Image: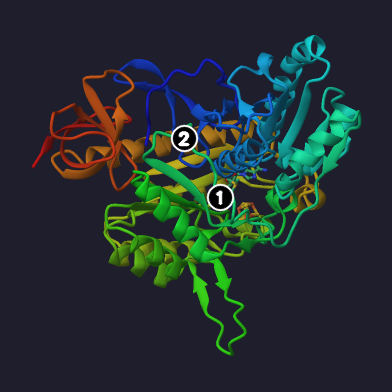
Amino acid sequence: MFDFVKRDKLSLNSKFCVILRFNFYSIMMDLVIPDKTHDESRQGEALMLEPKDGKNNGRKLYIESYGCAMNFSDSEIVASILSDKGFETTGDYSNADVIFINTCSIRENAEQRVRNRLKEFTVAKVKNPGLVVGVLGCMAERLKSKFLEEEKLVDVVVGPDAYRDLPGLIDKVDDGQKAVNVLLSREETYADINPVRLNSNGINAFVSIMRGCDNMCSFCVVPFTRGRERSREPQSIVKECTDLFNQGYREVTLLGQNVDSYKWKSEDGSQEAEVVNFANLLEMVALINPDLRIRFSTSHPKDITDEVLYTIAKYENICNYIHLPVQSGNSRILELMNRTYDREWYINRVDAIRRIIPECAISTDVITGFCTETDEEHKDTLSMMDYVHYDFAYMFMYSERPGTLAAKRYADDIPDAVKSSRLKEVVAKQQHYSYQRLQKQIGKVQKVLIEGFSKKSDKDYCGRNDHNAMVVFPVGDNYKPGQYVNVLVERTTTATLIGVVVE
Ligand code: SAM
Ligand code: SF4
């Protein structure tokens, strides 16, 4: 849903369309769309840990993250690995002995942002020549040792599957060398590492259930930067979620690039090896406790099964919300994108969701101006939006990424001005449907998990309903963050539901 937050870091030309100028009731506002899996408000956030007794090695780590929730979750793993080696965290990079920047490659502007940020670290390095500067994540994996040539400041380049090697790589830099490990793995899931979550509100947590992606969508760099798809052992996921619940967390978001292809086969030597699919895993997590809410992202339209939909419908604590990226509403473009479904297939999946979970919210991702897209084909995307009435959408202009199938096969032939005007049409339509869907909630009672004080006033609490919409209501004596309340929605802003707690 929409939310009002002014972000001075971002510009309106950002190709990642999170800030939209929006004329509503004749007021010009900046709208920032919060995204659970790619949260703009968290871009560049530094991770802070409490020092561990007796383990301090006297060195300070500064780690900041960009990109999707998977990257933020990985930074928690990195921090956990280094805190075991006695590193303390700092929120001020000028105090740090080691600076890590966990990067995203998904669009060109994401990489540019990292390069600009690296320039800002130059002064710190001049002041402290012993400072170690490391680049982690997707951009490290994409550029490999080329990074060391292009950015002289950088000492360490580490891909997403090599974080266990970080202490050794830092030692290497301490010995005066540069260090690179960008080996991708077919097995690494960091299942045994307990991520540290001290930046969190203690109520919502991300839990990685798989890594990598085997899909090879032609526009996408992820299969090259994150390697082959692999699923994490289900018991370790259930244990992590149970531990989180016992610590007071009340919502987990299960993360994977394509959660519906989650598959774990036990290797116990028995003839009938047990297979756990995503529907089974959802059920296992749902059974931990009815008060633990479950969300998940991302569902691929080619893989989401009726079994998953029936599991969502069966358990009250699995949120009725599915992120089902369409990318384009036109079958020819979907084929060029190598999405492996067409318009009819996608509509069939939406119809199945509506049939099995009538109250389900659906969100999507849209790319405008993919190679050779005609105006007519773009209109198919708009008509898909008219068909589905998405609750929410993440909307992007196509950004060619080196090494992808599209970059090799097709010309990036749609002018930026056309990509941008198509994006504006998509955004305008989405605003219409998002607002319409919020309006429909007026007069209804919603179960809300309280997350904390609202951004605008400590006289109000805020929390999310089942559909992930933000709900604001007055603070009361009988409830507090981490608890569920029933809220009667009385009105809405463009982004938020506003109401009162009822019994
Ligand atoms: N695995 C998810 C799926 O298949 O839907 C998506 C993961 S990707 C990190 C998030 C979104 O970024 C994609 O759904 C797509 O809309 C967008 N994206 C990826 N590559 C892009 C590109 N080259 N240009 C513009 N948008 C892109
Ligand atoms: Fe990229 Fe497609 Fe994999 Fe999503 S499913 S991460 S878009 S290749």
For residue 164, above or below residue 35? below
386 or 56: nearer the viewer: 56
Residue located at (79% from left, 9% from top): 127
Q: Which one is earlier in the sequence, the residue at label 1 or at label 2? A: 1
221 to the left or right of 358: right
For residue 17, above or below residue 24? below
Determine which quarter of the picture holds residue 350.
bottom left
Q: Is mark 2 within 8 Å of ligand 1?
A: no
Neighbor class of circle 2 (other Cα within 10 Å; few <14, some 14-19, many 20+) is many
32 to the left or right of 477: right
Q: Is mark 1 within 8 Å of ligand 1?
A: yes
Residue 427 numbered mark, or none: 2
370 or 463: nearer the viewer: 463
475 to the left or right of 205: left
Residue located at (53% from left, 45% from top): 366
Residue 184 % position (x, y): 76, 54
* The furthest residue to the front: 54
Neighbor class of circle 1 (other Cα within 10 Å; few <14, some 14-19, many 20+) is many
Residue 185 % position (x, y): 74, 58
Q: Amino acid at mark 2?
A: Val
Determine which quarter of the picture holds residue 126.
top right
Q: Give the position of the C terminus as an image quadrant.
A: top left
Residue located at (67% from left, 15% from top): 95
* The furthest residue to the bottom: 271
Residue 327 numbered mark, or none: 1
Q: Secondary structure at mark 2?
A: helix
Q: Amino acid at mark 1?
A: Gln
For residue 29, above or below residue 63? above
327 or 185: nearer the viewer: 185
